[in-house]
Image: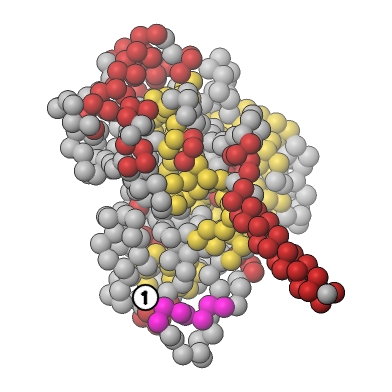
Amino acid sequence: MPDNEGVKDTLESIVIALILAFVFRAFIVEAFVIPTGSMAPTLYGAHGTIICEDCGVEFAYGLKDLADNRRIEPVRARNRAVCPNCNHGNTNLAVNDEQRNREKGDRILVLKWPFDIGGKWLAPARWDVVVFKDPADGVTNFIKRLIGVPNEVLQIVDGDVYTVPVSELSERAQTVLEEMRHRKYLLRTKQLRGAIGGLPRDVLDELDEKMTIARKTPAAQKSLWFRAYDHDYPPQTLAPNQPRWRVARGDASGWDTSSRRVRFDDRGVSADYIELSGKRIEAGCAYNVRGNPGPLVLDARVRFVLTPLNDEGALRLRLEKHGRIFWATIRMDGEVSLAESTEAPDLSAPVMARKKLSPFVPGRSVEVSVENLDYRLALYVGGDEVLSSSDDRDSPAYYGPDLDMLRRGRFKASSPHRLYAEGGTFDLTHLVVEHDAYYYHDPKYRALAMSWAPPGGWASPESPILLRGHEYFMLGDNTSASKDSRLWDQVGAHLEDRGEAFQLGTVPRDQLIGKAFFVYWPSGHKLRWLPRIGDWNWAIIPDVGRMRWIR
């Protein structure tokens, strides 16, 4: 009898454990696998990795994105994985061949209970990376970044996300936007023929006045800085299309960029500078391999470690966006400033912001970074923000967008990033240029199957989207190769019967699964000496160094 009781207790324990596991998976945390590259390089789908033959940077490239019908075929031996750092087209077939280097997508953990509970602090938030059901079938799990939240109007212009709460719009604007949303439904259900059309001039003017940039959270922004050029990995070939810090004054210059340690030693040359040449910074992603380069990205960060070798002189960083030229000045006596002026560093130009820090100490290194991001300038010294521009139009530090100009695409050419110096001697190490994520609408694509949709898809500059109280808008970080809210053109049976309650380009609240928070199993290290069996590539040793929080 006691033996029977023991067996019974064991079976009960196993059943309870299984029930708890199912409950945990259903309501608390669930594991998912990233299927495609729409979130690259934040998260990887099926991919290969390569070490650039020219500069030595390791990067990932996508092998096949089944969800994006613009991707025609997987990577073959004839394709080149273009290095995101030095632009070199790699041809190392041993690692550029799908069969020999195929890696699975990242395995992630998704928190489900916060979305189930909801409330002010646990509800889905802008810039979260979320998992949800594909509106086209209600079965496939998609993962994107949540960009638009309920009860707002959203528009993507020049790479940035602009929003305004519906409650802040006039009754006239609300009525027109609601009519556009209703017309979209009638066109989708073929109750109406024609095109979606645009907004009246007065409504666009109101949106221009009231919309503001939805800036990323610091955690999200950390993931959305993408490397443009890292001088710790300079190209060896130096082809015309490869980046380099070019000395402007030749032999007369005090700059030496021939090694990873960039040095300036004053020779009395006026306006002595170096500039990053040979680098067209685009919205495309190296992960895509086969194109989709995208437009120029002008939101950038330049960071380096500054080591002054004496207590004299000044360093000036020049950033430009749409013809506006900004200067961040760091003097060795501790004075720092931000200013907007002309082509040359005009010391008499009005200063936007100024501050006096402790003098820089010769021989003591300090981290410095300057960013022009989402129409906000900021200077960081030693990891701390010491100066920034302002959103206040009455402030001398004001810096903001002209939405009407941006929507019309009236952009001026911008010069490369430059570093000026005068007086003193400096060493710059770990000199890196990064660019921000850039969301945009390619006019070649509409919401794919719908000729009446706006060019580029939903929330384009000409066609803002009205998000109702239960609707969310999603974008992939790999903006040039992500079929996301901008381009959705199908409605699954699970949403079709909702009628007008469902809007193309959105995800209803009840279709959200949870927030992705951790990559628990990146593609592992392979055991090359083991024989290959089918798709099994023996990547069984966990790559602990790539386990990471998702932001």
- Provide the major secondary structure of the magenta segment: loop
Q: Which amino acid is tagged 1? A: Glu
Residue at 53%, 70% (x, y): give it. Answer: 523
In the picture shown, does residue 101 fall above or below 428?
below
Q: Residue 26, image x and y in percent?
A: 59, 51
Numbered range of the magenta stretch: 534-540
Q: Residue 313, image x and y in percent?
A: 66, 45
In the picture shown, does residue 122 fall above or below 433?
above
Q: Quadrant of the N terminus?
A: bottom right
Residue 538 visible from this viewpoint: yes
Does the stretch in magenta take in 301? no
Q: Residue 493, image x and y in percent?
A: 32, 42
Residue at 64%, 69% (x, y): give it. Answer: 544
Residue at 37%, 28% (x, y): give it. Answer: 501
Q: Is residue 312 left or right of residue 213?
A: right
Residue at 48%, 25% (x, y): give it. Answer: 469
Residue extending farthest left? 193
Crowding at mark 1 (Cα within 10 Å: few <14, some 14-19, many 20+) = some
In the picture shown, does residue 154 fall above or below 259?
above
What residue is disc 1 on? 98
Q: Which one is nearer the viewer's eye here, 442 or 305?
A: 442
Q: Residue 7, image x and y in percent?
A: 76, 73
Residue extending farthest front? 1
Does the stretch in magenta take in 538? yes
